[in-house]
């Protein structure tokens, strides 16, 4: 239904036509954005699935190695070997814009460049399985960081897709139809006013013509009467 508060004027009609044009253009742009985001999102989800499978498989290997090491070494010796880490990691985060969505990009930097610093213990009193577990855990760390990054990206893109979808639906099913209905309503009212004005002008014209004819008839009658009077006197 048309908005009952709309003012049926030509200025309002011009404003609504401009609003409709903007809404249609915005609707197309938002649909293109939604489609682009959906494509990026699906690619990211596929990447998440593949990388998660890799990470889970490697973590299972790490777990098996730690299980074997804990079976060979005593719990006290294992705890003592890992209690004081030698290596530290500094994590940094930057932002990347994907289809107007700012997604995080994680990077890390170790305190030292030596690969052996991931082992916080001496090799004489520990098991080789512990070395394997620590090495595997260090190797999977970068993949875990990448997985966290793309999962967060997928989450942010999903939220933006939902926002864009609601905006597209609002324009498609509410704003554009309502504006079109208001334009039809105002156009109908203006046409009615034009017809009413035309009808009044025609009536006024008929009245003026009628008055002019009556005035002409009266003038003719007076002229005839004057002529008759002059003839009688002669």
Image: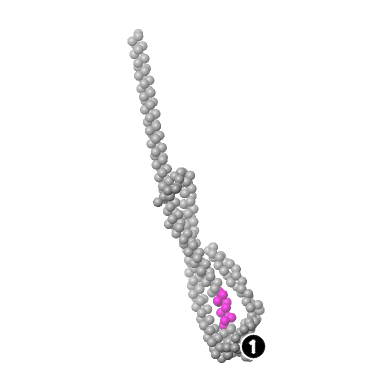
Asked if residue 193 is positioned above or below residue 178 in the image, the reply reads above
Q: Position of residue 142 (x, y in %)?
A: 57, 77
- Horizontally, residue 91 falls left or right of residue 209, namely right
Q: Is residue 37 visible?
A: no
Taking the magenta stretch, the answer to whether it contains residue 116 is no
Picture quadrant of residue 206: top left
Front residue of 35/135: it is 135
Asked if residue 212 is positioned above or below residue 159 in the image, the reply reads above
Q: Main secondary structure of the magenta part?
A: helix
Taking the magenta stretch, the answer to whether it contains residue 143 is yes
Q: Residue furthest top?
A: 234
Q: Residue at x 50, y 78 (%)?
A: 53
Asked if residue 20 is positioned above or below residue 133 in the image, the reply reads above
The residue range painted magenta reads 136-146
Q: Is residue 105 visible?
A: yes
Q: Residue at x 46, y 62 (%)?
A: 165
Picture quadrant of residue 92: bottom right
Q: Position of residue 141 (x, y in %)?
A: 57, 78
Q: Position of residue 203 (x, y in %)?
A: 38, 33
Q: Residue at x 53, y 70 (%)?
A: 152
Q: Residue at x 54, y 73 (%)?
A: 148
Q: In the picture, which quadrant includes the C terminus?
A: top left
Q: Residue furthest front?
A: 76
Reading the image, the residue beneath label 1 is 122
Front residue of 203/82: it is 82
Q: Secondary structure at mark 1?
A: loop
Q: Position of residue 125 (x, y in %)?
A: 62, 90
Q: Crowdedness of circle 1 by 10 Å Cα count: few (<14), some, many (20+)?
A: few
């Amino acid at each position: 239904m048309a908005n009952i508060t709309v003012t049926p004027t030509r200025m309002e009609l011009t404003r609504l036509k401009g609003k409709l044009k903007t809404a249609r253009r915005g609707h197309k742009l938002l649909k293109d954005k939604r489609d682009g985001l959906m494509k990026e999102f699906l690619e990211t989800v596929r990447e998440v699935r593949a990388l998660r499978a890799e990470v889970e498989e490697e973590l299972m290997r790490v777990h098996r190695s730690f299980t074997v090491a804990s079976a060979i070494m005593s719990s006290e010796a294992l705890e003592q070997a890992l209690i004081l880490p030698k290596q530290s990691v500094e994590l940094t985060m930057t932002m990347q814009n994907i289809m107007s969505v700012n997604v995080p990009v994680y990077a890390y930097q170790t305190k030292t460049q030596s690969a052996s610093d991931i082992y916080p213990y001496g090799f004489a009193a520990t098991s080789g399985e512990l070395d394997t577990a620590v090495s595997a855990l260090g190797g999977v760390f970068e993949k875990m960081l990448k997985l966290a990054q793309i999962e967060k990206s997928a989450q942010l893109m999903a939220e933006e897709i939902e926002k864009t979808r609601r905006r597209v639906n609002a324009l498609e099913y509410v704003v554009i139809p309502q504006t079109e209905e208001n334009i039809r309503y105002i156009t109908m009212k203006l046409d009615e006013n034009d017809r009413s004005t035309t009808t009044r002008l025609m009536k006024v014209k008929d009245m003026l013509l009628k008055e002019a004819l009556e005035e002409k008839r009266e003038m003719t009658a007076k002229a005839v009467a004057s002529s008759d009077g002059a003839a009688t006197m002669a």
